[in-house]
Image: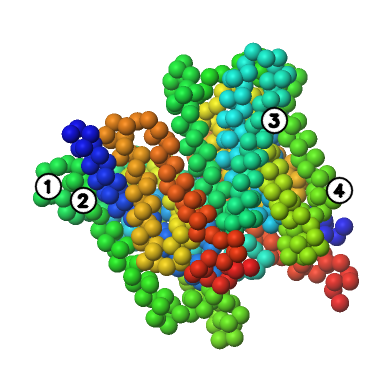
Amino acid sequence: MLKTVEIWCLSLGALLLSALLIAAFILSTGNSPFEVFYSLYRGAFGSWFSWQNTLVRAAPLMLTALCTALPARVGLIVIGGEGAMVVGGLTAAITGIAMQDAPSFIVISAMLIVGGGCAGLWILAVGALRHYRNVNETISSLLLNYIAIAVLNFLVVGVLKDPATLNNPSTYSIGDKNMITSIGDSSVHWGLIYGLVVCLAMWFVARRTTFGFAADVTGGNIRAARLVGLPVAKIVLLSCFLGGAAAGLAGVIEIAAIQGRANSSLNAGYGYAGILVAFLARHNPLAIIPYALLLGGIQASGGLLQRAHDLPDATVAVFQGIIFMMILSSEMLYGRIKFLQPKSMMS
Amino acid sequence: MDNDIGLWSVLIAVLGGAIRVGTPFIFVSLGECLTEKAGRINLGLEGNLIMGAMTGYAVSYLSGSPWLGVLAAATSGCVLGILHALLCQNKQVNDIAVGIAMMLFATGIAFFYGKAFIQPSAPHLPSIGFGNWSSSPVIKAALDINVLFFLGVALAPAMAWFLRTSRWGNAVRVVGESSDAALSLGMNINRVRLLSTMAGGGLAGIGGSYLSLYYPGSWSEGLSSGQGLMAVALVIFARWNPMNCLYASLLFGGAAALGPALQSVGINWGYYLFNAAPYVLTLLIMIAASSAKGTVRGMPGEFVK
């Protein structure tokens, strides 16, 4: 219990400190921090319109964050969410194009399964290389991002190109009837619900199942896990597969709910922002949800910051970098602040 | 016959590309090599590279001297290196995660302040035309070699010598091989790592200034394509040996030049696939260089868990 309080206190402290640093940064650009923070709030959560914008951006972030968070629970730092999202979206688009005339329920299910499955295998390869060959998973997952994007570009300007898309080369459309619809009359699509459900399910798996417990043991001390006879290889590979599949779903949603075809919008940076969300949430799938909303909100307000304060779009990246560094720095305080420690540990 | 000329010009373009595209790799990989020799991984060198490219270009434009730009780029890289080292001083803080955060932060800052410098054109670094004897424009272009390349080539043996024989170099190696041994020798581990990360970051900054001040030769947000990250893999391939870093950088430069070289002779098919060549190469090399036992020959002892 006290551990949860410690996480809350230190995370909030780190966020407050980043807010101060961001305020200092805004001052240095000659703007008023209060006005910029107010615009940030208005652009992210100030109206139903901005809420919708935030939610649409938070949905893929929840899923790409899992691509870093789940492998992190077994001790791997995977940053391949961007590539997994591309693979998921691309394979889903190919599936959708090939099956276009089937009933839409079947097409959407097939896209989710193929996209999630292929992206899962993509990150599973990272885990397998790490486990069996000791290839650094951070670097290999990052290289796979570039390779996935190259394959996407190759197909999108090549064999899969719809000649009608001149300015922004894209594949053929998956067909309007096969799109994931919006919730009610909002502009928020059902992909958000997928994201929420997957995060909740992964939280349940991590906290309430034997597999989740075994994964935490493996992440804590892999030798101990081997000694007690846990199937370490299976646990590592499955965690990577689930993480990749989650990011793949983000790609499927981008295709099936927004674009209707695969193009460069698949590598628009959700994968990289997901890394930040995962670290903010300390790899807890449940905590990913609020942090994805926070990050989605910051990104959603970028346009307003540009219009109202003449701050370029890179401002959002600076904010994210500051938050990321402060959260990581707060790691050094865990176990150091006396009144947050359990009594028995103090003596 | 036509085919022959095509093949030759591809070969020459790849060789020229090895030098032209490989130069920033030399600086970043040597920087990463030095950092890792001290037992720390700096994944944020991509940020140093982009930051160096931006400050180098901005200072060169404002002062009119590209060399001042290189100096400013090195300084900005040093500052980022110090920041990385300070954040990592605590054992509970993961150096790889800090690297990712630094990359995000430095890229954001560089794009933020770099907006003003996308349009104007800054004075470039000079190059020496070794190909002027030839009438062929292909050979001329391939042998137009920048001064920074020679600096990088000289730097590799210098660093090898520094690490092997000098007092400071040995301190770096001891800290990287075993922090326990370094402690028992009374060394200040954090200071050695701070200085190594700082110097490594500075080198990456110089690599960045090459990008904006010579090739491709202007500042834009799409300037770097992950060279800073590939450097980390490159150092593993080079087995933490500065001379190998130099050779590996040239190999990577050649691989990266393959796509454009084929396009220049009219082979457009698979341009984007050939662009992935350096990444595929890195991945294959990493798989080949790693072993199931977990240790790689030449790896600093601090990385063995």
Where is residue A336 shown, x and y percent of the image? 75, 69
Give the Cα separation between the discs numbered 1 and 3.
59 Å
Same chain letter for marks 1 and 3 = no
Q: Amino acid at mark 4?
A: Arg
In the rendered structure, are the residues bearing label 1 and label 3 in contact, judged by CB atoms less than 8 Å apart? no
Q: Identify which residue is drawn at 35% across, 50% down.
A: B253
Give the residue number, with chain letter if any, for mark 1. B134
In the rendered structure, are the residues bearing label 2 and label 1 in contact, judged by CB atoms less than 8 Å apart? yes
Name which of mark 2 and mark 1 comes first in the sequence: 1
Mark 2 chain: B
- Is residue A328 left or right of A217 when viewed as pictured? left
In the rendered structure, are the residues bearing label 4 and label 2 in contact, judged by CB atoms less than 8 Å apart? no
- Is residue B170 left or right of A340 when viewed as pictured? left
Q: Identify which residue is drawn at 76% across, 19% down.
A: A184
**How did the renderer colour the structure?**
rainbow
Q: Nearer the viewer, residue B162 or B120?
A: B162
Q: What is the crowding at mark 4: few (fewer than 14 residues within 10 Å), some, or many (at least 20)? A: few
Give the residue number, with chain letter if any, for mark 3. A113
Mark 1 chain: B
Give the residue number, with chain letter if any, for mark 2. B143
The quarter of the picture where residue B199 lies is bottom left
Query: SS for tag 3?
Result: helix
Q: Nearer the viewer, residue A342 or A141?
A: A141
Give the Cα separation between the discs numbered 3 and 2.
52 Å
Q: Identify which residue is drawn at 82% across, 59% down.
A: A3
Query: SS for tag 2?
Result: loop
Give the residue number, with chain letter if any, for mark 4. A208
